Amino acid sequence: MTSVAAVLAAGVPALPLFGAIAPLLARTPRQADRLALAVAFPTAAAALALAVIELAHGGALHGGWYLIDGASAVLLAVTATVGLCSVLASPAYLRAHREDASTTQRQPAWYYAALFVFWAALLAVPIVGNLAVVWLVVEATTAASALLVAFGGTRDALEAGWKYLVLTTLGLSVALLGIVVLAVEQTKAGHLGLGALDWHSLQSAAHTLPATPTLAAFVLLLAGLATKIGWAPVHNWLPDAHSEAPAPISAMLSAALLPSVLLVAWRVKEALQPSVGVATTRAVFVGFGLASIFVAVPFLWRSLPWKRLLAYSSLEHMGVIALGIGIGTPLAIAGVVLHIAGHALAKSLGFYAALPLLRDDKRAARQAPDGVAAQRRSTAAAMGVSLVALAGLPPSPLFVSELLILLAGVTAGELLVSAVALIGLALGFLGLLHALIESVIGGEAETTPKRLRLGSTRAMVALTSGFGGGLLALAATGMLLPGSGFIETLARGGL
Amino acid sequence: MSSWIVSAMVVLAIGVIGVRRRSVAIVLVGAQSLALSIGALELSSGRSGSFLVAAFVLLSKAALLPLLLYALMRRTREARLVVAAAGPLVRMAGAGMLALFAAIAVPPLGLGNAHTAHMAVALVLIGIAIVVARRPAFFQLLGLIVAENGVSLLAVSVPGGLSYVIELGALFDLGLIVTVAGVFALRIHSQLGTGDTELLRALRD
């Protein structure tokens, strides 16, 4: 099984990387769509197979350069699913883009090439077993995805892409500074070469590392990664990039990129905790978590364009995950795992629903939608399912995960943190419920209902049913997670 | 690494935040990259052959980067000067204060040479300050390079040397980011007729 895993670990990022060339060979946009699909299915299948192998294996799968544990498996499954769905949704986006803007025949090919490079880097993040190499991969996600954010070609898209590129690159420079500080300490301890920065080498050596430089490295790493995760107060790029990127890319940014980089931050915590101390790591994660939740809440209450509302919701949910990782007990980790998966499904469904929404009503890009249910029922259904799930209304898996994290806080003695988080989550819940009533269910349609394309309606219904079913299945699975061997292994933090 | 090389790198960075002409800024960033590679070559005696390779790659970067930046500058001619919010002396004084802050406030980072560690952090801070203080996309790109040079300075100063895989990877990533940022700078210029990012401020809540 280990040899199969080794082959798959190399193949999973390699497939989309080589696949990025395929759409460039296409002569027409339609050919590019088909070639992209031909690459996407085997990529997703390989990533899901690797995730299943890891879950069946139980413990972490180690190799010379890779480390695949339970958290990797969850991220692989999420990134494979969202990546495949984004490729499937891309022809609809590119068609609408061709109708709106003066585009060249080659643009779809370049779009797919950048998408596959971005997907390859995203799939590599949870697999790579070395801090320095994973930094390089995270930096590569910036280069590919910045071009995709600006793909729309508008002035706003350009602004969002530039802001994203500059801020996250600076953040990652700060993180690299932290990596170098760690490398210095490892070298002094006699651990030389690239292997000294392997996750398990760092963890096994952490208790011998001096406290002050290791704390400096931890703070630099977390501050740098926070910029890429979009934690408050270094989240400025997030609402702009998520709202201006093509909808399939927004789904990948929110559902896969943010939690993937969060996994790196989680591993940094697990690796350096023996030196830095539980209290410090908990304070840093809980601090970022609460700040992100409370910075997001006022925006969830405002009447924002649909994709911008979803972007601020991402800020809130990354805060919830940070809170869970900070608390760090098995109950909290069960909540974290469920939250990553549930947020990915709910958020990507919301972004895919933006495709028909923006196609039928161009004003929805700049203002809050109004009376969607009266005009486009299939779109309204998708938006409704997404909002209900993101708000954490039962039976959403995010209700279960938030409950688990709050309970974990109480049982860990963090009563004040849990109470403050509960207030923030309740306010966020009311904000999203308000958006559901005002934008999706209520309000009057300002234009006459349009005749919808049958194919797109069917696709939206199928997507909503699939993702809705997936969310219910996740909620049911969430009940079984606490106390399971999978969670106990993850919570022990072995890398 | 000689302390005068390290200090020169910081002085050159302070120059980048102050100068008006892009061509002068390219020369300063090129000189900074050259100083870094000379410092790395100086350290390579007594270290592994792979470190020597990394030092030569840094030297190639010092040669290629200014050419790339010059080509970008030629393709994005500014019709008029982009006025900064603060004057050059204020900007340079601010950058000097950041260097001073790094020298006083940054805790020991474990390097044998505390001066190098402090100046590396100062370079990262000045790089961030360039991005904040300079409005043209071109200067913001130079800010990213200055910050990366700060990290590279710390990396080459690690006793025994950091793994060349990391250094080469970081250089590859820098090349990638500079290329993508160059594409953005071209598109910003073609859309706005200037590289002034102050005009890209429509996205607010």
Image: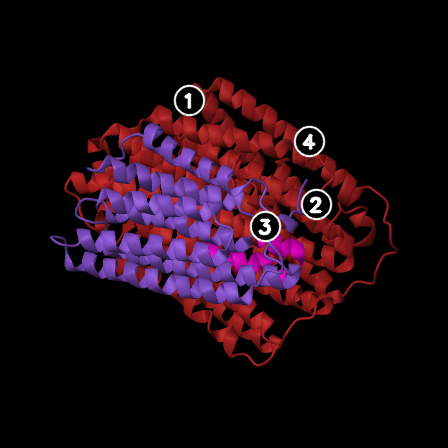
Chain colours: A red, B purple
Near mark 3 (Cα within 10 A), the count class, few <14, some 14-19 or many ≥20, is many
The tag earlier along the polypeptide, 3 or 4, is 3
Query: Residue A272: image x %, image y %?
Result: 30, 35
Residue A149 included in the magenta stretch of the image: yes
The Cα–Cα distance between marks 2 and 1, rounded to whole angstroms, is 35 Å
**Do labels 4 and 2 touch, CB within 8 Å?**
no
The Cα–Cα distance between marks 1 and 4, rounded to whole angstroms, is 27 Å
**Do labels 1 and 4 touch, CB within 8 Å?**
no
The Cα–Cα distance between marks 4 and 2, rounded to whole angstroms, is 14 Å
With B12 as the anchor, is A403 left or right in this view? right
Q: Which residue is mark 3?
A: A241
The Cα–Cα distance between marks 1 and 3, rounded to whole angstroms, is 36 Å
The tag earlier along the polypeptide, 4 or 2, is 2
With A128 as the anchor, is B180 left or right in this view? right
Identify the disc placed on residue A485.
none
Q: Which residue is mark 1?
A: A412
Chain of the residue where label 2 is placed in the rendered structure:
A
Q: Are marks 3 and 4 on the same chain?
A: yes
In the image, farthest residue toward the left: B46
Dot 4 amino acid type: Leu
Identify the disc placed on residue A430.
4
Please name the predominant secondary structure of the magenta segment in the image: helix
